[in-house]
Amino acid sequence: MSAKLEQLKAILAEVADLKNAAALLGWDQQTYMPEGGAEARGYQLGTLEKIAHEKFVSPEVGQLLADLKQEFAGADPDSDEVRLIKVTQHDYDLEARVPSEFIAEFARVTTLAHPAWVEARAKSDFSIFRPHLERIVEMGKEFISFFPPADHPYDVLLDQFEPGMKTADVRAIFDALRPRQVELIRAIAAKPQVEDAFLRLTYDEQAQWDFGVEVVTRFGYDWKRGRQDKAPHPFTTNFSINDVRITTRFDPNNGASALFSTMHEAGHAMYEQGSHPAFERTPLAGGTSLAVHESQSRMWENLVGRSLPFWEYFYPKFQQRFASQLGNVDLRTFYKGINKVQPSFIRVEADEATYNLHIMLRLEIEIGVVEGKLPVKDLPEVWNEKMKEYLGIVPPNDALGVLQDVHWSGGMMGYFSTYALGNLISAQLMEKIRQDIPNLDDQFRQGKFDDLLAWLREKVHVHGRKFEPQELVERVTGSRITPEPYLRYLSAKYGDIYGL
Amino acid sequence: MSAKLEQLKAILAEVADLKNAAALLGWDQQTYMPEGGAEARGYQLGTLEKIAHEKFVSPEVGQLLADLKQEFAGADPDSDEVRLIKVTQHDYDLEARVPSEFIAEFARVTTLAHPAWVEARAKSDFSIFRPHLERIVEMGKEFISFFPPADHPYDVLLDQFEPGMKTADVRAIFDALRPRQVELIRAIAAKPQVEDAFLRLTYDEQAQWDFGVEVVTRFGYDWKRGRQDKAPHPFTTNFSINDVRITTRFDPNNGASALFSTMHEAGHAMYEQGSHPAFERTPLAGGTSLAVHESQSRMWENLVGRSLPFWEYFYPKFQQRFASQLGNVDLRTFYKGINKVQPSFIRVEADEATYNLHIMLRLEIEIGVVEGKLPVKDLPEVWNEKMKEYLGIVPPNDALGVLQDVHWSGGMMGYFSTYALGNLISAQLMEKIRQDIPNLDDQFRQGKFDDLLAWLREKVHVHGRKFEPQELVERVTGSRITPEPYLRYLSAKYGDIYGL
């Protein structure tokens, strides 16, 4: 191997070690850390991140990257080596272009913005959060200014989470999607609602835990390279390709939410567990983008976990375990209940048919403020107008509207759309999977998921971050991200459930 | 504050962050890490330790220390500042004098020695381990050569764990102790043995856990700044003064071992939790030596937890919880049972009366090999001779003899004596405590331990690493470490139990 590539990989390995160590500190913070540990943990994370940053953006790494681009100019553009150099350069630009004074100032601004958002939401008073959000938007524009001009300024924000993705592409996809999702929701609203009261009974926590474990074990989540713990907000994290952990939480008033959350997180985790072993301790390990990551979590949670064939296998077991709650609920009633569509104010509680509309609303608002066309002060009003237009409902207050999500208070702009793109990709992959594995539903009916996982491993997981999201989707499905498969999926599923 | 001291403290804070992060990685490794995570964890720990080492032994730190010694030459020698400089210099010498090639070679040697020891013990065949131990002894001598000549070469090894402690001091203490402990054990052996079969029944694990939690909560272990988890080998670790965690394990055939282990670890943990808050992220945080640490764990486990007044309060509760095992066992029978003295082969299972003799045997052997007077090949024979002499029993094989402890395979030499010194210090402190708190036993009988903890906090814990062990003991008790209080404690206790 090239001596310079060896040198680069040695530095990248140490940076990976530091980031993986920081990830474990973060995992512990959200699972087991006693409250007294919080202050010291903040210092520890700060120190690890600072050292990782310094090591990564060193002039040595910049020079090695420049030299290696020369050295590998004629090499196979799809080789691991060339892709490693490319992905590392992308990360390097992202970290090196942003001055450390900006990062420090941004940390200060968001540290103050978070409690202001908490208070604003508690009081449902946008004016408390508004000056903080204005400052965050201003700094978002400053952040954009550190990068070369893009087709659209919002591209810079998007590129952090979806390498290579353009605002114009996302807009075109969403423009095609929106009217047809709105139309679908209206059609559903005109039909009688399905029953789901049986879900909102008390379900024993340990029995829920055990069932979730049984399901994701069958999916193929590798417990020798992972574990599950409880956390207030479920998440997946990893410290190696071989140590990818999930967390879950239990809602005492919902018998299925922990189960779907476990399937969702296991979807993320199996993606991370599937990276090529040779990518360990390199930037090629892990998921290529948030949207592709979300395509995996949604695949297992929704396309598998909320499908009828899945429940044809699992419902008898589930019903037996929760006989007092579900003894009189037949499979089809249960299936309809877990797929109930109802426009609601809160994104994180939205169903498959309405979810993307919550995202589009946020994307339009973010683009508007970045372009400078939408003043922050107008956000509550614009929010409510769009809710009315897309979902047919108007939040009674800003806590249920513009103030609901934590993201902006943390300075996070540019990634809401990854959630919706993930849904689209999941369906697009699934159409291809069904061509390659024609008897997929029969396999689900027998509780078999190995062919599905093997397909995802080979086509998606093993590549880690080698290919950008659009590139990966095109390599696998033959076309770039398109909303058609997801629309077909929704029409077929809800056509059946609601008799459209 | 001095600008240079600020500079030094900023570096030390980052080093502390890295070491604390590494400690969390170690905690996770022994509690929750899935097996797949092991390889990456090794890299992560290696990277954190390497960076912490590089930052600490940098010429900048050396220069700052030199400058600060000048700057603080006239300052109060007991001030935090002067002590911080002194302790940091001690740590610096220890880390900076040892060449990194030696450290790397030592890591290689012990990495090979460990599995050899495992195999040797399994087969009870010393010859498998012997060449590895010979190399480790050789490297121990090389380690000593990196330091200025001491009164005795073994001082250098001892000083790593007991700053300021001399081999001559330890020998003098042990020489005074040995004949009287041997005599005590012979006297006990001549008396009828106490009953303890009731301990070797099945005790519900959760009930044991709950009882342990109740006890250490009463002791004053602060759960807001700690937690307990299960681990194969119990240990205490910390990532901050405010995050000090304990672990325990359950022996299905012993109803009290987890409880005593929990008290022991809580004793270590309360010491760490009691460091002065200003010492956070400095080398002054934590216990001053392994012996003083052990004095705290043994204090709570033995001097408190195996005392009659303690059980006068707790036994009715314990008996009630384990009614089927202890319903017919009265307090005094129980008390005698948990204090049974019986010479045995395995150090970690030894009682209070025989324990120190296991240590003395090891110390004499270590000094012998370091002095070059005792060839490694003779160790099995020497071991068995001393066992016969001190404890009156001869191991039937080397697995139960010279091969029983893991320490030498890890290259650890010089710290076995800290275990015995800890016992002595605990009794020496306790005599002083009883002068200051005359109704201590009455307090125990009421389940009250706050005065004891407050005393330890003020006299021992709050000082962290400011004072060397001998210095600390002398400041608190008026004399340096002496075996008399421990001998008085053993005589009184076992005189009563065995009717001597």
Image (tube, coloured by chain):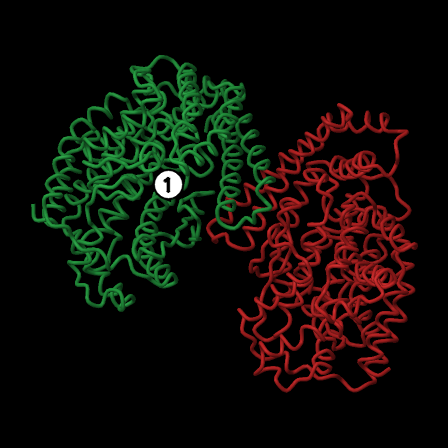
Chain colours: A green, B red
Residue nearest the observer in this picture, A348 or B353? A348
Q: Is residue B470 left or right of residue A222?
A: right
Visible in this render: residue A332?
yes
- In the image, A61: left or right of B411? left
Callout 1 crowding tier (Cα within 10 Å): few <14, some 14–19, many ≥20: many
> The N terminus of chain B appears in which quarter of the rendering?
top right
Question: Which residue is depicted at the point 54% across and 50% down?
Answer: B28
Q: Residue A63 placed where, x, y %?
A: 50, 18
Per the image, the residue denoted by label 1 is A275
Residue A491 vertical placement versus A66 (above, below): below
Figure quadrant of the C terminus of chain B: bottom right
Left or right: residue B475 compared with residue B193: right
Q: Is residue B131 visible?
A: no
Residue farthest along the top direction in this orientation = A149
Residue nearer the viewer, B364 or A285: A285
Give the residue at x 68% y 38%.
Answer: B281
- Depth check: A400 or B165 in front? A400
Which chain does tag 1 point to? A
Badge 1 amino acid: Ser
Q: Position of residue A51 (x, y in %)?
A: 57, 30
Q: Nearer the viewer, residue A354 or B388?
A: A354
Q: Secondary structure at mark 1?
A: loop
